[in-house]
Image (cartoon, grey):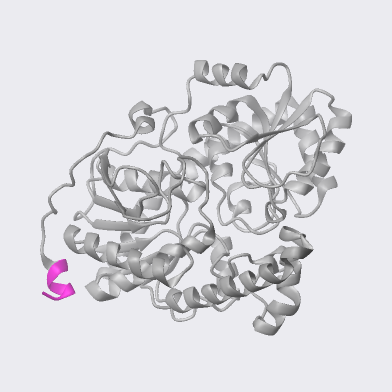
Amino acid sequence: MGGRDRRARRGLAPPLRAAQPLEARRRARAAPGVHRLPRRRAGPAVNVCFVNEYFPPFAPGGAEWSLDALAHALAGRGHRVTIVTPNWGAAPRQEYDGVHIVRFAFPKRLEPGRRLAPAKWLANPFFYGWAALAVLRVARRERADVIHAQNKHSLIPATLAGRLLGVPVFLTIRDGSIINAAPVCLHHHDRMPPDCGVRKLWRECSEDYFALYVKDPRRKLFSKLAFLYFWLDSRLKQRFLRKVDGVIGVSQGILDIYGRSGLLEGVRRVQAIYNVPPAAAPPPPDEVEALRERLGLRSQRIVLYVGKFSPGKGTADLVAAAREVARAFPDVLFLFVGEGDLDTADPWVRRLGPLPNRDVLALYPLAEVVVVPSVIPDALSRVILEAMAAGRPVVATRVGGSPELVIDGKTGILVERRAPAELARAIAALLADDGLRASLGAGARRHVTERLGADDSVERLLAAYSSARG
């Protein structure tokens, strides 16, 4: 039976056998100002097959929680949602709140949380072929109307399966990693350089990458060869990018970078659709206070950073800014949540390591300021969304999609990237002015509630699906 005939068949596939619902979802409650969509829909039900290389409880970044929120927003409107992901060590099948999760067999195991698997497990032809077979089986059984890859390593499997089934394929672009797995060019430029090629990569880009991220001279040749391999993998992904039926950027800023780089030529549908804001209720006050006690936080004034510790994320700039801020505010404490190298022993800096998402959400109410000092453009920082939803002012760099969230002087403060002194002044200004913090925090929460709600994002996504399905 052809793909067109399969799509014409109506009715839902039999439900998957449900495992125990996720504990975090069971505990979540609706809250004022946070979206919780009723079970309704404006048009025919759509059967969506999402594909992502991670999904909670394996969630190394914001993409997984953004997908979780989107999936539940769609299911809440009566659409059928299936998520296909590698099994890093959880139940093969789960269903909760109308979202079906299928984890296909995979040899690598991870601990639940924010841990990333080494890239070699995902950026290789064997993964692409194995994952494509899994997506093909699930999408065929579920009679998917659309296959939607949610991240870079899912692009090739989703596209292969979609072409075999005759089903439209979409990709969500969340970062610059299809330009290059480690796009050091975006440290300095707002596009892929026009002379990008093997010679430039070997002589310049890999040298920059080594100086920023590796540094051990014994590993220089290996790091340059690995950089070349992942660059070639990115080139393969770029070819598949041009074959999809639609590209969704989580911000206009990230789409502009890809457009200037010439990577969206020939793609018929390109649209910016913001991530759905956090759906779960914020942690209750007793949970927040319990976390304060557990972490030994007393009278300190908290400045919070959440993410990887790396040159691209600007953590060295924040450490330098912290020194300036600490001179003026001796009671300040900078909390760093995440993994990576953080080269400091300053007493006003505390590294917490990776934390469960529930603990991260409970940290926002304890923070007076949240900082996102990225050097490489963030497409749309999940940390900014979560902080704004919690009513916290954000200091962010003027790159990528951050200016679309942080309205300078209204919901937070924007600074230039790689500018520690400017970063320090912005943080100090917020710590010194209770009224300014309260005003920007209230504006941030209002902006998320009124301008970045789920309704608009879901309706625009469904319209894009409808256009591709004809």
**Residue at point 38% right, 29% down?**
28
Question: Is 4 inside the magenta-drawn segment?
Answer: yes
Above or below 315: residue 356: above
Q: Is-magenta flag for residue 205?
A: no
Q: Is residue 274 left or right of residue 406?
A: left
Q: Can you tell which quarter of the image residue 270 is in?
A: bottom left
Task: Specify the segment rendered in magenta.
Answer: 1-7
- Asked if residue 123 lies left or right of residue 184, the reply is left
Task: Tell me, yes or no, if residue 307 can be seen here.
Answer: yes
Q: Position of residue 163 (x, y in %)?
A: 28, 75
> Which quarter of the rendering shows the C terminus?
bottom left
Q: Position of residue 465 (x, y in %)?
A: 31, 63
Residue 321, horizontal then vertical, whole percent: 82, 42
Nearest to the observer: residue 431 or residue 229: 229
Above or below, comparing residue 79 to residue 361 in the picture = below
Asked if residue 188 can be seen in this view, the reply is no
Q: Nearer the viewer, residue 360 or 373?
A: 360
- Which secondary structure is most common in the magenta stretch? helix
Q: Residue at x 61, y 16 (%)?
A: 293
Percent coordinates x, y for residue 148 in the rendering: 35, 61
